[in-house]
Image: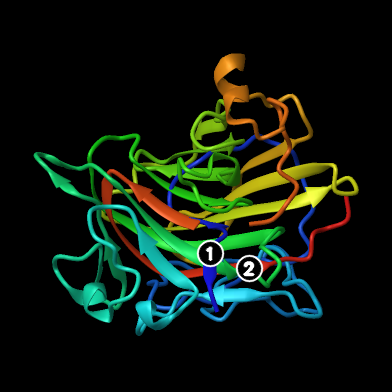
């Protein structure tokens, strides 16, 4: 079976603020290998039970009933998972398990059981993005309403705006197929700021940032939980985009960004460039269709407990 990347990455993006009621509760259960440093109080519950995923991490929204898909990073042998692949950098590390533990590869297991990703070494910095792709086959429906979750620790960053970028709702992001490269990007920068950004085509269809705000203190040498959530609303005419952080790695999640894309969020590029791709989309195109990727730019980053769940979108 041939697989092609959908939309899910590790990197940083944007969001705006709107209140939404959440049908599930924050958990007191600690994620796998994440140190519990404080007691947390559940905020939302269902049937008096805390909803957690395979890693014991709180679910903000429930998994879609009757076949909602779930993907979890294989913490023992990631590259034996045919749905997971790496891209970026100078090496292709999507097939050999040896690359997963090699000091020359882009992903390396750490002594605490987490994994480390890094870009191309250049003088004084790591200057390339590493993409961790969760792939969808051509015969499956792509991911659409999703909750992407994981924990990251920045080891070093080339600059304060180096970022984690988790995105979905598109396919391959390559110049030879520009119209396939659509996505909503959720960003978490090394300086602790967050944002949402929309990519209408690759690479000439980027919008400005929304909810580009300081959400926490710098991420260097500490674990932080990061959730990027997106789902259609208003009878599939608009999209809600949310970012949650577990700032102290205690499985206590706080919403820090909430954006609605219902039009009027325009690409920044001039008309002649934007329409040169011939994608047949407006400059404020709303990405209602499916597709996922985890990405890191210009930093060395440890990560663990990555997951993607197809969620039951709340009624709006």
x 35%, y 83%: residue: 77
Res 267 quadrant in image: top right
Q: Is residue 293 left or right of residue 42?
A: left
x 68%, y 52%: residue: 230
Q: Position of residue 83 (x, y in %)?
A: 50, 74
Q: Is residue 290 above or below residue 104?
A: above
Q: Is residue 250 above or below residue 231?
A: below
Q: Is residue 165 left or right of residue 190?
A: right
The quadrant of the picture occupied by the N terminus is bottom right
Q: Position of residue 307 (x, y in %)?
A: 53, 69
Distance between mark 2 and mark 1 Cα atoms:
7 Å
Q: Is residue 124 left or right of residue 76?
A: left
Please say if the residues under marks 2 and 1 sit with CB atoms less than 8 Å apart. Answer: yes
SS at circle 1? strand
SS at circle 2? loop
x 32%, y 58%: residue: 153
x 29%, y 67%: residue: 93
- Residue under circle 1? 4
Looking at the picture, the colour scheme in use is rainbow
Residue placed most toward the observer, 131 or 63: 131
Residue placed most toward the observer, 79 or 216: 79
Dot 1, crowdedness within 10 Å: few (<14), some or many (≥20)? some
- Residue 164: mark in rendering: none
Q: Residue furthest left?
A: 123
**Observer able to see residue 172:** yes
- Residue 138: mark in rendering: 2
Q: Position of residue 124 (x, y in %)?
A: 11, 39
């Amino acid at each position: 079976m041939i697989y092609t990347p959908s939309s899910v990455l590790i990197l940083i993006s944007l969001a705006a603020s709107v209140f939404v009621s959440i049908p599930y509760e924050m958990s007191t259960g600690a994620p796998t290998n994440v140190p519990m440093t404080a007691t947390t109080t559940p905020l939302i519950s269902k049937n008096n039970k805390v909803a957690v995923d395979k890693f014991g991490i709180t679910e903000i929204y429930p998994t879609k009933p009757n076949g909602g898909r779930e993907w979890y990073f294989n913490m023992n042998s990631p590259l034996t998972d045919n749905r997971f692949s790496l891209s970026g950098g100078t090496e292709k590390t999507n097939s050999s398990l040896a690359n997963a533990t090699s000091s020359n590869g882009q992903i390396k297991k750490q002594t605490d059981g987490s994994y480390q990703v890094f870009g191309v070494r250049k003088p004084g910095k790591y200057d390339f993005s590493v993409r961790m792709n969760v792939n969808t086959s051509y015969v499956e429906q792509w991911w659409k309403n999703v909750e992407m979750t994981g924990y990251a620790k920045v080891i070093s960053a080339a600059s304060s705006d180096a970022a984690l970028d988790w995105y979905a709702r598109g396919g391959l992001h390559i110049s030879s197929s520009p119209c396939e490269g659509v996505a909503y990007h959720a960003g978490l920068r090394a300086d602790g700021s967050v944002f949402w950004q929309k990519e209408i085509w690759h690479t000439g269809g980027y919008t400005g940032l929304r909810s580009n705000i300081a959400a926490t203190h710098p991420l260097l040498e500490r674990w932080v939980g990061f959730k990027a959530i997106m789902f259609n609303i208003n009878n599939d005419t608009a999209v809600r985009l949310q970012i949650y952080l577990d700032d102290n790695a205690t499985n206590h999640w706080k919403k820090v960004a909430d954006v609605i894309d219902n039009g009027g969020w325009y690409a920044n590029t001039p008309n002649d460039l934007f329409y040169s791709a011939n994608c047949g989309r407006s400059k404020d195109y709303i990405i209602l269709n499916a597709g996922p990727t985890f990405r890191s730019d210009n930093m060395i980053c440890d990560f663990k407990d990555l997951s993607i769940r197809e969620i039951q979108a709340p009624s709006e």
